[in-house]
Image (cartoon, rainbow, N blue to C red):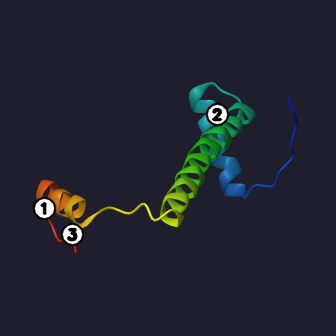
């Protein structure tokens, strides 16, 4: 396991301390958990965007019929 030092605003550190006391966890555990959740979410988003760009570059777009079917299914203004 690696060690990292970082600066946090006083308010964030206070809130982290309060949460650590309330949950019986360490500040380090909570910060590590928050970073892992952030990395998972951001990695997923970057991967989805990359995949969509690849599909767009390949000309893989929804047809007019697919758009119309989605409009019929979900309603609203699809165009």
Looking at the image, residue 10 sits to the left or right of residue 54; the answer is: right
Residue situated in front as seen by the camera: 6 or 66: 66
Mark 3 lies on residue: 78
The numbered mark, 2 or 1, whose residue comes first in the sequence reads: 2
Residue situated in front as seen by the camera: 45 or 58: 58
Callout count: 3
Q: Is residue 41 above or below residue 23?
A: below
Mark 2 neighbour density, 10 Å: few (under 14) some (14–19) many (20 or more): some
Looking at the image, residue 50 sits to the left or right of residue 13; the answer is: left
Residue placed at 58% from the left, 50% from the top? 47
Q: Within the image, what quadrant is residue 54 found in?
A: bottom right
The numbered mark, 3 or 2, whose residue comes first in the sequence reads: 2
Q: CA distance from mark 1 to mark 3?
A: 8 Å
Q: Is residue 65 above or below residue 2?
A: below
* SS at circle 3: loop
Q: Within the image, what quadrant is residue 40 found in?
A: top right
Quadrant in which the N terminus is drawn = top right
Mark 2 lies on residue: 20
The residue furthest bottom is 79
The residue furthest top is 24
Q: CA distance from mark 2 to mark 1?
A: 46 Å
Q: Nearer the viewer, mark 2 or mark 1?
A: 1
Q: Position of residue 36 (x, y in %)?
A: 66, 38
Mark 3 neighbour density, 10 Å: few (under 14) some (14–19) many (20 or more): few
Q: Which mark is residue 44?
A: none
* SS at circle 1: loop
Residue placed at 88% from the left, 37% from the top? 3
């Amino acid at each position: 396991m690696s060690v990292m030092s970082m600066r946090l605003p006083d308010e964030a550190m206070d809130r982290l301390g309060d949460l650590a006391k309330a949950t019986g966890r360490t500040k380090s555990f909570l910060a590590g958990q928050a970073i892992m959740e952030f990395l998972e979410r951001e990695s997923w988003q970057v991967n989805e965007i990359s995949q969509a760009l690849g599909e767009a570059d390949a000309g893989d777009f929804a047809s007019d019929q697919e758009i119309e079917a989605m409009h019929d299914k979900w309603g609203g203004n699809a165009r």
